[in-house]
């Protein structure tokens, strides 16, 4: 219910980084704040606003959520019209950040014109808080990641005078409140570029630290019942108030008609036994190599379980398989010979956009093999689905150890020293989650308890939003 006895509605401008994995949690936070009477100005580039608009259609009609465009400048190395990380390969993400940085002056002009009560910004806009401070508008940094990762990877102590090494990144910060969470060497080697780079370049870690330094507080996509010790550690290590906003899992959209392709998934699931299906998906921006696809396929096949595997490819790749019903899809060439014929009676390899929330909510789904993206972990918790965790990059390794080692709601796939994995390692992890009676029962119990604490009646989600609104009110009053 909206807050009562409010003298003046808060007006908050929200400005996420140009990635769908960042935009969506900002959208969910915007919706929850608006439901409590906060007026939202949601700012992004034109193509992102076009994509966001249908997601907020009902809310913008009923609540005060205004969508606002800020055109992205053209920069060298960035294709015309590319406005999100999903539209360019990883090597072009730096060009996207350069284009974003050119929005600093237009952003300042916009703030002067709109004069919101508060700005909530993302890690990449390190200049947003400084710009807001010029015109006496308080600003808060919203990390769409969890506290375990932020307090492991994004502290000032991680920024060395000398080059950061693999050994530096595999060692938790002093006092870090977990003995099971750390980057593996192969993960640290992958992430080194965020900490080291050419002189004069604004590194990822520098963006994060500058964003943090200028913020009035840090909002975190988490809750005290599941990450209390990490939230408190992050506060102590940064000297900033850290305010959890809940896990922000999206609701299944009611009234939206699924496409023929999307409906296919649910129709197939309807024919399967309860809790029998392994759902496999690596999100919208994590893609497997040919070798990884082969190992994954043979591992899934060896489990003997029914499966729904969403196998996606970047739109800019040579093996774009957007249409599930295209019989000439190149995906067949990437799978092991004979895999499709051997598993046709019990599994589906699906190459179009999948309705993940509907799938996780389906009673036939008993496990979720995921890349360990925080949004995927959150959605698994929302629907009480046990996790098989196969992190690929970035924050995912920390997420996997949080979910498997600390929260005990999943099993992480064991890996080779170089980060590769075998079909046997896939098979073993899946069967622990799906078929091992004692372990599967314990995982289910832990997941049910976590779901209750966060999303159940009287859970932390609603309380987090109320406390967050109270916090920004106090910040505004004392600014």
Image (tube, grey):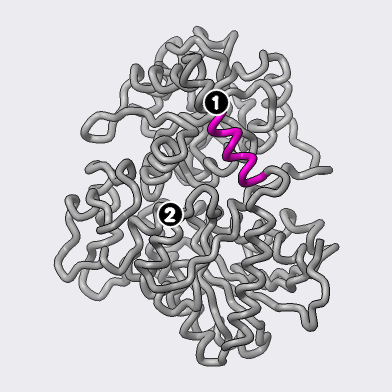
The verdict on residue 450 being magenta is: yes
**Residue 312 % position (x, y):** 51, 35
| Image point (54%, 56%), residue name | 221
Query: Which residue is disc 2 drawn over?
Result: 229
**Residue 93, picture quadrant:** bottom left
| Image point (71%, 26%), residue name | 266
Secondary structure of the magenta portion, mostly? helix
Is residue 194 depicted above or below 384 in this figure?
below
Going by the image, does 296 lie left or right of 366? left
Sequence-wise first label, 2 or 1: 2
Front one among 214 and 96: 214
**Residue 399 % position (x, y):** 42, 44
Query: Which residue is disc 1 drawn over?
Result: 367
Disc 2 and disc 1: Cα gap in Å?
28 Å
Residue 82 seen by the camera: no
| Image point (62%, 75%), residue name | 472
Mark 2: secondary structure: helix
The range drawn in magenta is 445-455
Q: How many marks?
A: 2
**Residue 434 % position (x, y):** 51, 19
Going by the image, does 44 lie left or right of 168? right
Front one among 473 and 299: 473
**Residue 414 % position (x, y):** 32, 28
Q: Which mark is residue 348?
A: none
Is residue 451 depicted above or below 2 in this figure?
above
| Image point (49%, 9%), residue name | 304
Kindly report which numbered mark, 2 or 1, lies closer to the viewer in this rendering: 2
**Residue 348, picture quadrant:** top right
């Amino acid at each position: 219910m909206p807050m009562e006895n409010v003298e003046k509605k808060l007006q908050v401008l929200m400005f996420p980084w140009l990635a769908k994995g960042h935009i969506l949690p900002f959208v969910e936070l915007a919706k929850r704040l608006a439901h409590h009477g906060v007026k939202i100005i949601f700012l992004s580039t034109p193509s992102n606003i076009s994509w966001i608009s249908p997601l907020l259609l009902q809310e913008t009609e009923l609540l005060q959520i205004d969508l606002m465009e800020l055109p992205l400048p053209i920069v060298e190395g960035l294709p015309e019209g590319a406005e999100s990380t999903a539209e360019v390969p990883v090597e072009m993400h730096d060009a996207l950040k350069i284009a974003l940085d050119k929005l600093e002056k237009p952003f300042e002009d916009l703030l002067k014109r709109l004069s919101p009560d508060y700005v909530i910004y993302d890690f990449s806009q390190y200049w947003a808080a400084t710009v807001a401070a010029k015109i006496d508008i308080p600003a808060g940094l919203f990390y769409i990641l969890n506290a375990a990762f932020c307090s492991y990877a994004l502290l000032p102590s991680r920024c060395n005078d000398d080059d950061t090494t693999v050994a530096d990144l595999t060692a938790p910060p002093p006092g870090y409140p977990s003995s099971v969470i750390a980057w593996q060497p192969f993960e640290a080697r992958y992430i080194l570029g965020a900490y080291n780079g050419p002189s004069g370049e604004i590194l990822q870690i520098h963006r994060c630290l500058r964003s943090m330094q200028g913020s009035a507080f840090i909002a975190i996509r988490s809750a005290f019942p599941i990450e209390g010790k990490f939230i408190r550690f992050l506060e102590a290590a940064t000297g900033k108030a850290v305010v959890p906003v809940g896990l922000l899992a999206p609701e299944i959209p009611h009234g939206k008609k699924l496409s023929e392709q999307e409906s296919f998934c649910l129709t197939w699931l309807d024919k399967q036994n309860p809790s029998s299906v392994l759902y496999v998906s690596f999100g919208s921006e994590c893609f497997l190599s040919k070798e990884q696809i082969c190992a994954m396929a043979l591992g899934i096949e060896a489990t003997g379980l029914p499966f729904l595997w969403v196998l996606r490819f970047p739109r800019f790749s040579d093996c774009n398989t957007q249409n599930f019903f295209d019989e000439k899809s190149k995906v067949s060439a990437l799978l092991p010979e004979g895999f499709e014929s051997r598993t046709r009676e019990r599994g589906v390899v699906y190459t179009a956009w999948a309705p993940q929330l509907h799938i996780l909510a389906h009673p036939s789904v008993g496990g979720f093999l995921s890349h360990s993206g925080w949004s995927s972990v959150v959605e698994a918790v929302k629907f009480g689905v046990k996790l098989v965790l196969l992190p690929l990059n970035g924050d995912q390794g920390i997420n996997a150890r949080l979910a498997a080692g600390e929260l005990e709601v999943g099993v992480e796939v064991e890996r080779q020293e170089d980060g590769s994995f075998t079909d046997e390692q896939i098979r073993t992890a899946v069967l622990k989650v799906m078929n091992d009676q004692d372990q599967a029962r314990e995982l289910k119990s832990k997941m049910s308890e976590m779901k209750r604490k966060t999303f159940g009646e009287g859970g932390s989600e609603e309380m987090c939003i109320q406390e967050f609104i109270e916090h920004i009110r106090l910040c505004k009053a004392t600014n």
